[in-house]
Image (spheres, helix red, strand yellow):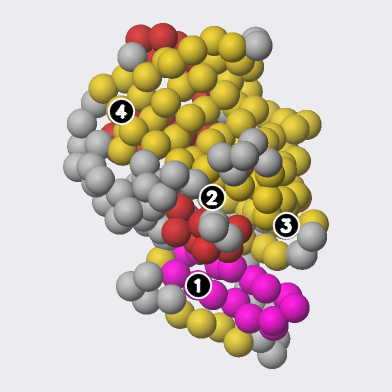
Amino acid sequence: MFKKTTFLFCVLTFSNLSIADEVSSDANVLLSKVRNNLSALKAEFIQYEWLESNQKTDINSGTVWMQAPAQFRWQYIEPIEQLIVADGKQVWVYDEDLEQVTVKAQDNSLNPIYVIINDELSKQHYDIKHEVNSQGLDWLSLTPKLHSEEVKSVWLAIKGDVITQIKVFNHFDQTMVFEFMQVQRNPEVSDDLFTFVPPEGVDVIQAIGE
């Protein structure tokens, strides 16, 4: 199964892919509305794995902040507190209970979260297509231009100018879902929100080549 730390850590540190550009016109219009004058975003989220039996498992919740072009702060609150900070150069995963921080160089290529705030990267690394309008939501599919070990495809649900869901499918037929609520466009963001300094006394692990 997906695990929240493993999944996000992998998704935030993918290797580079080749450049191409294939975006359906409908998808381009929808994404343009989402990104119009968007420099930062804040939302509450629920993250879970969606099983073939139509059940949710490994449910987590918290708050996420994003800032273009490549900064994130994922604050997990329930059921266990955990913090993931992507500062544009490195990704920091802080587990307070274990008194441990894992850090790796950040590679801004195939992360589906970048689709929300980075037009260039999403077009560069995905073929993007409008799939269906259902129950007031427009669904876009994103297929990696080159094979990825972690991501088979990504689906985005768009309502108006907001992405309300992200579904990430892997090659083991597993689905990770992110639902976003109380989305704020361009909230005030403090200078240190995307900066992480390991607390004194915690173990810092350099994750090289993972």
Q: Which numbered disc, 1 or 4, marks the residue that appears first in the sequence?
A: 1
Q: Residue 34 in the image: x percent, y percent?
A: 55, 21
- Pick the residue in front: 207 or 52: 52
Q: Callout 4, which amino acid?
A: Asp
Query: What segment carries the magenta color?
Result: 85-104
The residue lying at 37 percent from left, 19 percent from top is: 129
Helix, strand or loop at mark 2: strand
Q: State yes or no: residue 36 in magenta.
A: no
Name the front one of labels 2 and 4.
Answer: 4
Q: Residues within 10 Å of mark 1 (few under 14, many from 20)?
A: some
The circle drawn on residue 103 is: 1
Mark 2 highlights which residue? Answer: 71
Q: Is residue 61 visible?
A: yes
Helix, strand or loop at mark 4: strand
Q: Which numbered disc, 2 or 4, marks the residue that appears first in the sequence?
A: 2
Mark 3 highlights which residue? Answer: 76
Mark 4 highlights which residue? Answer: 127
Q: Callout 2, which amino acid?
A: Gln
Q: Are marks 3 and 1 in contact (CB under 8 Å)?
A: no
